[in-house]
């Protein structure tokens, strides 16, 4: 029995109760047959939505007019609204999407050379409680549906010019993806469909706080994804301080599960390490990390902390970051440091949603 088969909360049907074509469980061929249309038109509609970037049914110009009108009357494409769209000077774009139950999630398009990477959310909020992360400050509200995960991909693709395609997906937005595998995996399968986005599995990264049983499940069911484990500390004392859920798991169990994943997938593991000033950024911390990784052919992705308003943590200085990286490199660790992309648009997970929640909760009289 796979873990996490129970939704956190039931998601109510969209208010107008119309079928949602982006939901893979909706049987579009059957609907077409009932409407007296050939079932194969489902593929044309799919291609319009996933590859040809139609915004509405009226864009689907090769469908018969009566079918388009009927689709418009009885069906909906989008269940989200774009509540905010921010563009940074480096080309990073961020969408704050409002879901049908008024919850909000974030997703980001990153432009890096020829890469067009999207960063998507898997849950509203997060239950993991990492003390420096904006996503989990109010806990988890609910899992995203498969359709809502797909919708982020399709909304972001539409920000690209017609001659550009998405190349990579990272599931590093709000939420813990391995706590919502039942809905995430079908969405990622859709992303790979050659009739749609056609993104190769090797270009999809799932980032996890490190849930050993869910890593094992992924390993059995679908080991083709690139796995990134958010480590942030090489000893349990410090990690539990930063990532409270670590208390009941422990890094040894995480490393063992990551090793099993590596043995099965053959794909190099990535460990993410958010560098927090004066907390986990000392040369001693770096040496402990190098010892902990041992001879593993893993990549360490060092991410400078992006300050979250209201939280007491510090960004690392350039000097401490360089020192940290030097220690790792000298110890033979494969290391990369994520260039800061879109930090001006609060691109770290959960920051934009939090800002919107705070702005909406400001009492009217303080607006003056
Ligand atoms: N739950 C998953 C996905 C979270 S987001 C996980 O833990 O991996 C992806 C990465 O961004 C994680 O490593 C997370 O710790 C990191 N992160 C969260 N808030 C951040 C911030 N304010 N600055 C820098 N990195 C942050």
Image: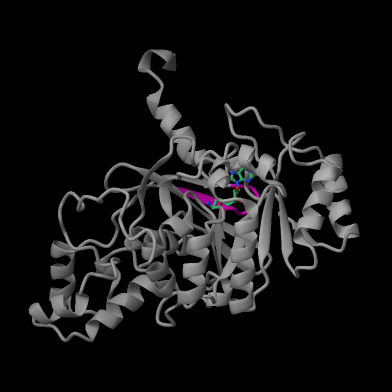
What's the coloring here? one colour
Q: Residue at x 30, y 66 (%)?
A: 22
Quadrant housing residue 116: bottom right
Q: Residue at x 57, y 46 (%)?
A: 246
On screen, residue 236 above or below 358: below
User: Magenta includes 122?
Assistant: no
Relative to 10, 250 lies left or right: right
In magenta, the rendered stretch is: 88-96
Q: How many marks?
A: 0
Q: Quadrant of the C terminus?
A: top left
Q: Could you say where residue 314 lies in the image, as x and y percent from the top left? A: 71, 32
Q: Residue at x 69, y 50 (%)?
A: 273
Q: Could you say where residue 173 lies in the image, as x and y percent from the top left? A: 51, 52
Q: Could you say where residue 195 lies in the image, as x and y percent from the top left? A: 40, 82
Viewer can see residue 51: no
Q: Which residue is outermost to the right?
A: 330
Given residues 68 and 78, the one toward you in this image is 78
Q: Quadrant of the N terminus?
A: bottom left
Quadrant housing residue 32: bottom left
Q: Residue at x 44, y 70 (%)?
A: 188
Given residues 115 and 145, the one toward you in this image is 145
Quadrant housing residue 109: bottom right
Relative to 204, 195 lies left or right: left
Q: Could you say where residue 245 lies in the image, as x and y percent from the top left? A: 53, 44
Given residues 171 and 211, the one toward you in this image is 211
On screen, residue 9 above or below 138: below
Viewer can see residue 136: yes
């Amino acid at each position: 029995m796979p873990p996490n088969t129970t939704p956190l909360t039931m998601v109510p049907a969209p208010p107008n109760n119309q079928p949602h074509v982006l939901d893979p469980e909706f049987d579009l061929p059957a609907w077409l047959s009932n409407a007296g249309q050939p079932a194969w038109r489902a593929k044309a509609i799919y291609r319009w939505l996933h590859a040809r970037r139609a915004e509405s049914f009226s864009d689907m110009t090769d469908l018969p007019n009566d079918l388009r009108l009927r689709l418009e009357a009885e069906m909906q494409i989008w269940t989200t609204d774009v509540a905010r769209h921010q563009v940074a000077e480096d080309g990073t774009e961020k969408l704050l999407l409002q879901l049908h139950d008024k919850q909000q999630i974030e997703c980001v398009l990153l432009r890096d050379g020829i890469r067009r990477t999207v960063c998507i959310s898997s849950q509203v909020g997060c239950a993991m409680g990492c003390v420096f992360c904006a996503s989990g400050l109010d806990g988890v509200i609910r899992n995203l549906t498969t359709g809502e995960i797909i919708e982020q991909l399709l909304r972001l693709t539409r920000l690209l010019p017609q001659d550009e395609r998405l190349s990579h997906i990272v599931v590093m937005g709000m939420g813990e993806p391995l706590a919502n595998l039942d809905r995430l995996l079908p969405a990622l399968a859709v992303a790979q469909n050659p009739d749609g986005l056609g993104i190769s599995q090797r270009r999809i990264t799932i980032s996890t706080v490190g849930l050993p049983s869910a890593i094992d499940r992924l390993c059995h069911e679908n080991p083709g994804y690139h796995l990134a484990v958010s480590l942030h500390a090489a000893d349990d004392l410090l990690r539990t301080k930063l990532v409270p859920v670590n208390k009941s798991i422990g890094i040894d169990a995480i490393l063992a599960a990551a090793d099993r994943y590596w043995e099965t997938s053959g794909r190099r593991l990535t460990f993410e390490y958010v560098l927090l000033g004066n907390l986990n950024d000392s040369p001693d911390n770096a040496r402990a990390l190098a010892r902990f990784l041992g001879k593993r052919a893993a990549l360490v992705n060092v991410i400078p902390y992006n300050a979250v308003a209201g939280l007491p943590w510090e960004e690392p200085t350039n000097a401490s970051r360089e020192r940290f990286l030097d220690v790792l490199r000298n110890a033979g660790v494969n290391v990369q440091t994520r260039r800061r992309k879109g930090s001006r648009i609060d691109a770290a997970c959960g920051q934009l949603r939090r800002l919107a929640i705070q702005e909406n909760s400001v009492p009217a009289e303080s607006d003056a």
